[in-house]
Image (cartoon, grey):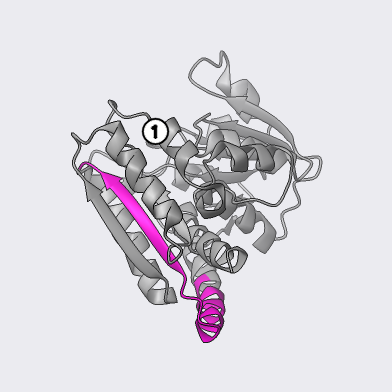
Amino acid sequence: MPVIIDGKKLAKEIREKLKIECDELKERQIKPKLAVIMVGNDKASQIYVRNKSKACDEIGIAFEEHLLSEYIKQEKLINLIEKLNKDDSIHGILLQSPIPRNLDINEAFKTIAAEKDVDGFNPINVGKLCLNQNTFMPCTPYGIMKMFEAFDIDLTGKDVTIIGRSNIVGKPLVQCCLNKNATVTVCHSKTKDLKEHTKNADVVIVAIGKSKFITADMIKQDSIIIDVGMNRDENGKLTGDVDFENVAKKASYITPVPGGVGPMTIAMLMNNVIKAAKNLN
């Protein structure tokens, strides 16, 4: 049987340490604060924002929510971000994605001050990640790297196949793995023979949003499987992008869904807010 990478347990340990750090900051009259902007009423986004609010409460980070109409104009969104940039009481700003298609999310990310960009999507922070400099790492890739660290998984020289090339997970993960001296292959919807890449990989990280997409015949014996997917199967049960039951029989390490990468994403967001509060004071 493989080692199950328990993201829920690891995230809890991280949050406990962050609470101590948050209390120490408050003793110095620094009160960490996160501002979250949500545009429209996407159901999944509402759940994510609620979970972020709960994590803030647990650690002692102040939480400020800005709910905007899906019909808001770009100019008003940018004006709000600029206002939050200037507010010294706010240390972290997060724009919950997705946002309505009529809005330019890249302009919005670019407007968030780099020093308050706790999601790591401002082009300055993206560039720093590429250069392996100290920066805010996007929270899901950061959470995955923390998992590798916690379980003493050294990526040096390993063949890592990443399935998915989103700006939020896939692309930053490439840089994170390269920075740890892995040999990285990126697969996506236009990849000709996906199985050819996955079956030779030491590590497979999948983030495409297709239930049980990765099957046992697609991986090699004793590979490490990281499942970023969050899907509902035909019975409404939460599943990942990996056929966990069968893939687990061949893997050496594997993340479950739920309880794997998800809790780590929120823990690393909290980590970034505390880091921002320290940097800004």
- Please check the rendered image and state whether residue 22 is part of the magenta-colored stretch, yes or no: yes
> How many other residues sit within 10 Å of disc 1, few (<14), some (14-19) or many (≥20)?
some
Which quarter of the image is occupied by the N terminus? Answer: bottom right
x, y percentage for residue 127? Answer: 65, 37
Residue depicted at x 56% and y 77%: 21
Q: Along the line of sight, which residue is nearer the eye, 160 or 73?
A: 73
Which quarter of the image is occupied by the C terminus? Answer: bottom right
Q: Along the line of sight, which residue is nearer the eye, 240 or 279?
A: 279
Check the image and report above or below for 120 versus 100.
below
Residue depicted at x 49% and y 71%: 12
Check the image and report above or below for 237 versus 208.
below
x, y percentage for residue 97? Answer: 36, 41
x, y percentage for residue 50? Answer: 29, 60
Magenta-colored span:
15-40
User: Seen from this angle, which residue lies furthest bottom?
Assistant: 27
Residue depicted at x 18% and y 41%: 69
Query: How many numbered marks have been drawn onto this rendered protein structure?
Result: 1
Residue depicted at x 49% and y 53%: 261
- Is residue 250 visible in the rendered image? The answer is no
Element under label 1? helix
Q: Is residue 164 left or right of residue 51?
A: right
Q: Quadrant of residue 198?
A: top right
- Please check the rendered image and state whether residue 164 is part of the magenta-colored stretch, yes or no: no
Which residue position is annotated with label 1?
105
Q: Along the line of sight, which residue is nearer the eye, 131 or 204?
A: 131
x, y percentage for residue 235? Answer: 22, 44
- Is residue 134 visible in the rendered image? The answer is yes
Q: Check disc 1 and give the amino acid type.
A: Ile
